[in-house]
């Protein structure tokens, strides 16, 4: 097995070392901890002494995704024994992904040395500096001569305290960021949700915890909930890396959803938004989300027309819909079945295409409805669409519904012709 000593000394040896070094320490660090300023001894220890903190906020989503991909390890793999060498090794590997992504390895590879202490709890678990420790260990064990300056590191060891005091300190240090980069939005939100549940905090108390506004907390937690739903719908529960670059999308889903009231419309909007996150071309279809909500009532008939043969009548089994974010019951009765249909894998791409095209049409209408030559512009657009359809006629093209569209177009043109005749009479 890989050298176990690399991932922390045994607990009794850690405590013994701390007591010995603290007794002879001459330098101290002032730290706002447990609601007061404290002077804590700075000690110098071998790099292989500390253990990584498993409840590290940065790795919360990474741990869940790791468990989803390694189901044989059990859901309690990270929780059952923080001292376990396999747990510490897995945590090191997750931290290394963050280290690489943030450029910390290269930062320290160039000769940069430790500038701030690593903060440990009384048992030697890292409260602040997990990524830095990971980077230093990776470099030191790769070349102990070149990176010998990381053989010993400066740390402070917190006095005995409860988990809430430690979480509060971590939150404060997160606000006053040092060389670390910003948490990914999903990791930050999950960290907040875990802390909220662990300490039984209200949203306002959680906001105070992280020195932010309650409305910001509420939005972050709702975004996390939608992201979780989205991943479950894709059959990728807890694969958080799939949503880490979709902050804007889930923010728009949360903000736009607040403008809807019925459970059916909310469910349809939600599932339609999820299809807009799946653009196979790698585009940014999620930018249509705000206008998808705005024009939902006008886009809905187009979705119904396309998927009506797949919609079955009857009550949809979703006991949470009536209470969905305070929504009122659906009155039309077809929004929820439609929402279920467009979320099916075979329909998602087509549904996204319909929503996109319908939104673009509504945007065009809004932009041009007040200009004098609006009728001409709309007819030009319709003609262009017809010409495109003609140029794409193939032997295998479906004829279903084509005659109905031709009839509707001819009827519309008759109205326009009558208007034109009167205009020039």
Image: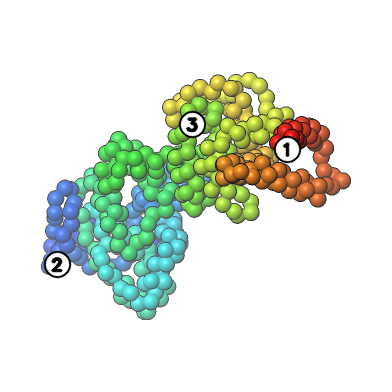
Please tell me which residue is depicted at 67% across the width and 39% down the height of the picture: 347
Q: Nearer the viewer, residue 23 or 30?
A: 30
Q: Which residue is mark 1?
A: 424
Please report contact status of discs 1 and 3: CB closer than 8 Å, yes or no: no
Element assignment for label 3? loop
Left or right, residue 68 beside residue 375: left
Left or right, residue 225 beside residue 56: right
Circle nearer the N terminus (3, 2): 2
Alpha carbon distance from label 1 to label 3: 45 Å
> Where is the C terminus found, in terms of image quarters?
top right
Residue 201, horizontal then vertical, whole percent: 29, 37
Element assignment for label 2? loop
Please tell me which residue is depicted at 65% across the width and 31% down the height of the picture: 301
Res. 101 visible in picture: yes
Give the quadrant of residue 291: top right
Q: Nearer the viewer, residue 3 or 62?
A: 62
Alpha carbon distance from label 3 to label 2: 59 Å
Coloring scheme of the render? rainbow
Of all residues, the one furthest to the front in this rendering is: 425
Please tell me which residue is depicted at 56% across the width and 52% down the height of the picture: 284
Of all residues, the one furthest to the right in this rendering is: 395
Element assignment for label 1? loop
Q: Which residue is mark 2?
A: 27
């Amino acid at each position: 097995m890989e050298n176990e000593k690399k991932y922390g000394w045994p607990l009794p040896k850690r405590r013994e070392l701390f007591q010995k070094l603290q007794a002879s320490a001459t330098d101290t660090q002032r730290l706002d901890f447990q609601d007061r300023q404290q002077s804590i001894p700075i000690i110098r220890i071998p790099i292989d002494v500390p253990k990584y903190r498993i409840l590290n906020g940065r790795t919360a989503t990474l741990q869940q995704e790791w468990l989803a991909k390694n189901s044989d390890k059990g859901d309690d793999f990270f929780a059952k024994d923080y001292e376990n060498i396999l747990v510490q090794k897995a945590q090191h590997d997750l931290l290394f992904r963050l280290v690489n992504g943030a450029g910390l390895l290269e930062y320290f590879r160039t000769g940069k040395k430790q500038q701030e202490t690593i903060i440990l709890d009384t048992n030697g678990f890292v409260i602040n500096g997990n990524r830095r420790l990971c980077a230093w260990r990776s470099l030191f064990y790769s070349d102990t001569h070149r990176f010998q300056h990381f053989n010993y590191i400066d740390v402070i060891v917190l006095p005995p305290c409860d988990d809430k005091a430690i979480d509060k300190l971590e939150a404060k240090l997160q606000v006053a960021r040092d060389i670390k980069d910003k948490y990914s939005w999903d990791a930050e939100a999950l960290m907040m949700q875990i802390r909220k549940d662990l300490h039984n905090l209200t949203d306002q108390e959680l906001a105070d915890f992280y020195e932010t506004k309650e409305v910001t907390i509420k939005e972050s937690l709702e975004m996390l909930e939608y992201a979780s739903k989205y991943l479950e719908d894709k059959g990728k529960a807890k694969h958080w890396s799939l949503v880490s670059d979709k902050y804007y999308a889930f923010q728009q889903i949360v903000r736009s959803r607040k403008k809807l009231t019925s459970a059916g419309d909310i469910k349809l909007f939600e599932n339609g938004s999820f299809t807009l996150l799946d653009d196979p071309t790698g585009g940014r279809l999620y930018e249509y989300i705000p206008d998808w909500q705005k024009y939902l009532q006008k886009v809905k008939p187009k979705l119904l027309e396309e998927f009506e043969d797949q919609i079955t009548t009857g009550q949809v089994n979703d006991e949470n819909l009536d209470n969905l974010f305070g929504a009122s019951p659906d009155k039309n009765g077809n929004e929820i079945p439609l929402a279920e249909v467009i979320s099916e894998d075979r329909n998602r791409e087509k549904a996204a295409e319909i929503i996109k095209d319908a939104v673009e049409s509504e945007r065009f209408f809004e932009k041009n409805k007040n200009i004098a030559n609006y009728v001409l512009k709309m007819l030009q657009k319709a003609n262009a669409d017809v010409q495109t359809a003609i140029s794409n006629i193939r032997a295998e093209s479906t004829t279903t519904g084509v005659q109905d569209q031709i009839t509707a177009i001819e009827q519309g043109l008759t109205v326009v012709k009558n208007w034109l005749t009167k205009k020039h009479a």
